[in-house]
Image: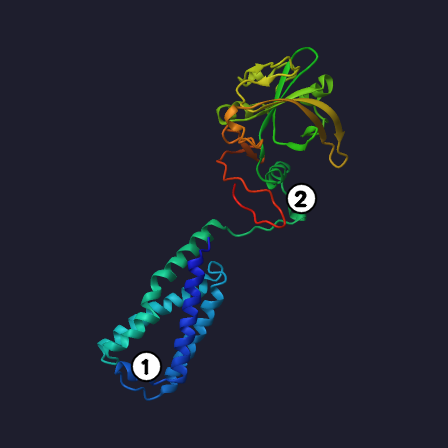
Amino acid sequence: MVKPWMKNILLIAGLYNILWGSWVIFFPLHVFQLTGARLPQYPEIWQCVGMIVAVYGLGYAIAAYSPIRHWPIVLVGLLGKVFGPIGFIWSIYNDVFPLSFGINIIFNDLIWWIPFALILKKAYNANQCSPSVKSISLEEFSHYPERFRAKFINSLSGIKSSNLIGTINDDGLTNLCIVSSVFHLGANPALIGLIIRPDSTRRDTLENIRQNKFYTINHVNESILKQSHQTSARYNESTSEFKACQLTEEFLDNFKAPFVKESKVKMAVELIREETLPENGTHLIIGKIQHVYIPEDTLEEDGFINITKAGSLGVNSLDGYVKGDLIGRLSYAKTDKKTEWL
């Protein structure tokens, strides 16, 4: 949120204060002579004012490197620039200074009100967007309830893809479940990974993949979000989630597993290998992509698929669904070139 003008203003203010303060320190009577004000009886006091102003200048210069972080320096400076004119008005009323002395007030105080106030407004907005940090140790985390821990860790990795896995068993009963653990493994061959939780309880999706070696991956979009989320419910093994959750199964190009008709981005996948992870008993399913179905307008000339055009959703944790527009695409990173927007 730091803008270049904020740094520039504080650097200029710092330089001005140091110069003005030095002028007053070395020539304490000069400003009185120029404005026609009565000479002070104790110029040393006025030199102290110059010293304070110069020190403020050093503070502004420091704040310029991080205006948002060093907002208290800007606040104190602004308060001084508000109280200074108030004191000058009081001195005019009591015939202490002539009006001509107000030239100092204009350049020392008034012209800085707006830029300093804008910097403080930016700092306030930044602090509103940046709540205080909560630190959680492993020991503290272990004392939280099990479901809390599950959602916490699931949220921690950020936004993940949201997909429906379509399968069928040997008896022809279809199955559908929502997952957030699909990930890219390689393009040649075209491999895709999927994590399924331990089969200490019944896992119809895992059993169906083991039996028939084929499954589909279907992106979730907003029009089927509630139905897709509902597939995570524990239906009995004789119930198809397609029917229970009001989603339409379809078979394309004689592929042996069902697709979700309402999904706009779909993949036909063949099982290559299953690995059980000894650390927690989860199952890594490695599949080879056999066929892809996408809206024509999502595919760009260089092979990039703009899934936001298809309305594909992401998921944060187990139940927080996310959608958004594509910010943009960046150039391929090279050590001898700067990254640029395509």
Q: Is residue 130 visible?
A: yes
Find residue 118 and report its horizontal and vertical position in percent: 38, 57
Find residue 233 and report its horizontal and vertical position in percent: 59, 24
The residue depicted at 62 percent of the width and 49 percent of the height is: 136
Find residue 10 and report its horizontal and vertical position in percent: 43, 65
Question: Horizontally, is 188 left or right of 3 in the view?
Answer: right
Question: Horizontally, is 27 left or right of 301 in the view?
Answer: left
The residue carrying mark 1 is 31
Of the image marks 1 and 2, the number of the one nearer the N terminus? 1
Which of 324 and 198 lies nearest the eye of the viewer?
Answer: 324
Q: Vertically, is 47 above or below 109?
A: below
- Asked whether disc 1 touches disc 2, contact meaning CB atoms under 8 Å apart, the reply is no
Q: Quadrant of residue 194?
A: top right
Q: Say what amino acid the circle numbered 1 marks.
A: Val
Question: Horizontally, is 71 left or right of 203 in the view?
Answer: left
Say the numbered circle drawn on residue 295.
none
Query: In the rendered view, how is the structure colored?
Result: rainbow
Crowd tier of the residue under label 1, counting other residues whose Cα lies within 10 Å: few below 14, some 14–19, many 20 or above: some
Q: Say what amino acid the circle numbered 2 marks.
A: Ser
Q: Quadrant of residue 183?
A: top right
Q: Vertically, is 322 above or below 255?
A: below
The residue carrying mark 2 is 142
Q: Is residue 226 visible?
A: no
Q: Vertically, is 34 above or below 109?
A: below
Q: Vertically, is 7 above or below 21?
A: above
Question: Which of labels 1 and 2 is toward the front?
Answer: 1
Mark 2: secondary structure: loop
Find residue 213 and report its horizontal and vertical position in percent: 72, 19
Mark 1: secondary structure: helix
Which of 161 and 319 lies nearest the eye of the viewer?
Answer: 161
Q: CA distance from mark 1 to mark 2?
A: 68 Å
